[in-house]
Image (cartoon, coloured by chain):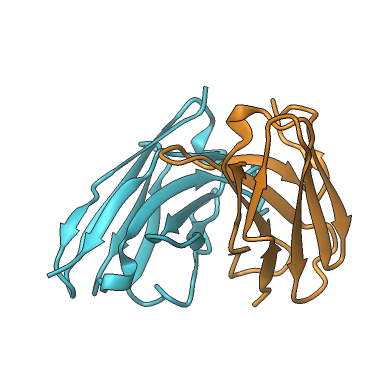
Amino acid sequence: EVVLTQSPATLSLSPGETATLSCRASQRITSNLAWYQHRPGQAPRLLIYRASTRATDIPARFSGSGSGTEFTLTISDLQSEDFAVYYCQQYNNWPPLTFGGGTKVEIK
Amino acid sequence: QVQLVESGGGVVQPGGSLRLSCAASGFPFSNFGMHWVRQTPGKGLEWVAFIRFDGTGPFYADSVKGRFTISRDNGKNTLDLEMNSLRPEDTAVYYCAKDRIEMATIGNFQHWGQGSQVTVSS
């Protein structure tokens, strides 16, 4: 099973700042990694797939990078609606599909 | 517009059973693989099960294998999850989710329902 480790667990930032979230895989997963945003009480939303491709209707301030075992989600110019929990997820070697533990981006 | 609406959640005693359903609309349901994903209290997301667009597979997380059964009815555009021998650790919000590419097995969750709460408690 591929274990994904996200860091940091919590990121405290102000609107307008840039968030940098990390996801590390326990084995190489090429670029088969996705990122999701989850706001309380809402359905999760696919942001990025194939490590760096933005999903439909996702703003350009969200960008993904990385391959192999190290991946990054960058959120530029944080907006109020961006404060949420973010999960990475691998689909290179499954079942099982696995998620990271999440990073909470909170308002400082 | 893609819509996924879960139903069937509730409170059940340990060892009991429950059946979740997901009604799909706004896309060609029979062309897409479908998943169940859950979020346990205070924890993150956990993939539960997957069924291919044509009903083959299915695949399960080890934590539910032998207790849960995923199925679909492409004529009715519905996805089900039969849950037996429920345990307190199965308490979670259960989401149905659509895979990203039609006629393929990818493992991304492009669209999600709003979720259905399942509570296993005596």
Q: Exactly how many numbered labels are in the figure?
A: 0
Residue A4 drawn at (x, y percent): 68, 68
Camera sees residue A97 = yes
Residue A20 drawn at (x, y percent): 78, 49
Above or below, A86 against B63 in this view is: above
Residue A64 drawn at (x, y percent): 81, 46
**Is residue B22 rendered to the left or right of residue B8?**
right
**Is residue B91 rendered to the left or right of residue A101?**
left
- Which residue is more in the foreground, B86 or B77? B86
- Which residue is more in the foreground, B19 or B92? B92
* Chain B painted colour: cyan
Q: Going 37% across and 60% down the picture, which residue do you hit?
A: B41
Q: Residue furthest front?
A: A108
Say which quadrant the C terminus of chain A sits in. top right
* Chain A painted colour: orange
- Which residue is more in the foreground, A3 or B15? A3
Above or below, B2 against B30 in this view is: above
Residue B92 drawn at (x, y percent): 35, 58
Say which quadrant the N terminus of chain A sits in. bottom right
Q: Going 14% across and 68% down the picture, which residue do you hit?
A: B13
Q: Going 50% across and 56% down the picture, which residue do you hit?
A: B51
Camera sees residue B110 = no
- Which residue is more in the foreground, B31 or A108? A108
Above or below, A105 against A101 in this view is: above
Above or below, B55 against A42 in this view is: below
